Amino acid sequence: MEHDEEQPAHEQQADRMEDNADRMEQHSEQLGEQIGEIEGDWEQKEQDPAVPGARPDPGEDEEPIPGVNADEELASEEGGP
């Protein structure tokens, strides 16, 4: 990258926006990894009878949380995101 004072303002802004996009993409990947680890940990705890409160009650379906692992087909039928 050249010196900022040699670039037109719109190119400086474009460079800043690209840097922001790169940071956000990296942050998103890190969050995705953390979510995957947490989901795996929870699934493991659900299978462990020694973990109180982690196992769902027999016959009780898990209620979906809006926006979390949403069924895209169902959401589009209901007019959701």
Image (tube, rainbow, N blue to C red):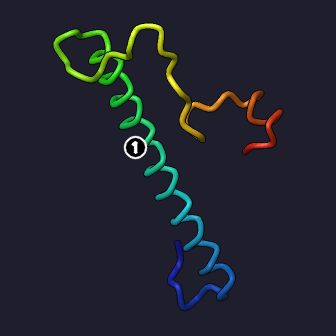
Residue 62 position, x and y percent, is 50, 22
Apparent side of residue 80 relative to residue 58 in the rendered image (left or right): right
The residue located at (79%, 37%) in the rendering is 78
Quadrant of residue 53 within the rendered picture: top left
Residue at (32, 16) in percent of width and height: 55
Q: Is residue 79 left or right of residue 50?
A: right
> Crowding at label 1, few (<14), some or many (≥20) Cα neighbours within 10 Å?
few
Q: How many numbered tags mark residues here?
A: 1
Q: Is residue 8 above or below residue 81?
A: below
Expressed as whole percent of the image width and height from the top left, the position of residue 27 reads 43, 51
Quadrant in the picture for residue 43: top left
Residue 10 sits in which quadrant? bottom right
In terms of depth relative to the viewer, which is nearer, 73 or 9?
73
What amino acid does circle 1 point to? Gln
**Could you tell me which quadrant the C terminus lies in?**
top right
From the viewer's side, name the closer residue of 55 and 41: 55
Residue in the picture at 30% in, 15% down: 44
* Callout 1 secondary element: helix
Residue at 58 percent across and 65 percent down: it is 18
Q: Which residue is mark 1?
A: 30
User: Residue 30: x, y in percent?
Assistant: 40, 43
